[in-house]
Structures are given as C-alpha cells and as structure tokens.
Image (cartoon, rainbow, N blue to C red):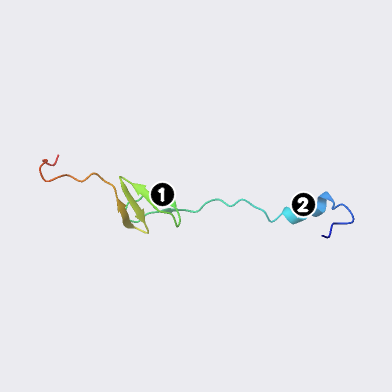
Amino acid sequence: MPNPKRRHSQQRSAKRRTHYKAEAATWSVDTVTGETHLRHRAHWVEGKLYYRGKVVVDNAPAATEGEPKQ
C-alpha cells in the first residue's frame, strides 16, 4: 500500500479543507398553516403532519358520536 514519502505541510491541508463549509438550513413558510418549517421535511401542526401543504397523518383526537362537541 503506498505511503507518502514526505510529510504534507499544514498549508497544503488547509487548502484542501477550504471547501468544507457549514451551510445554514433553508426555512419555508407553509401556505396552508403559515408555520415555518425546514424545506423538504414534514412538520407537525396541532396533531396533524403536513408535507407540501397537504395532511399526511392526522393524529388529532376525533370526537365520538355519543359525546357533544364543545
């Protein structure tokens, strides 16, 4: 297995690492709920899971027929 003959300088390593940058996450506002969320991610609002403005999962407690609505 090949190994370097000489040590790489610190400057050489720094030049290679200049392209490693942290990027800030992109936030969006949902058109239906108005909530701020990470792009391309589903988000929960009041017991409902939204993705691209549509309800994907609804975990809100449903009222049964026997109980009066408040």
Q: Secondary structure at mark 1?
A: strand
Numbered tag placed on residue 5 in the rendering: none
Q: Residue at x 78, y 52 (%)?
A: 13
Q: Which residue is mark 1?
A: 36
- The residue labelled by disc 2 is 14
Q: Position of residue 69 (x, y in %)?
A: 13, 42
Please name whichever residue, 16 or 28, is drawn nearer the observer in this view of the structure: 16
- The amino acid sitting under disc 2 is Ala
Q: Is residue 8 above or below residue 66?
A: below
- In the displayed orientation, state which residue is furthest to the front: 1
Describe the element under mark 2 as helix, strand or loop: helix
Residue at image point 81% right, 54% down: 12
Q: Is residue 67 above or below residue 55?
A: above
Q: Who is closer to the viewer here, 63 or 51?
A: 63
Q: CA distance from mark 2 to mark 1?
A: 37 Å
User: Which image quarter holds the N terminus?
Assistant: bottom right
Above or below for 19 versus 46: below
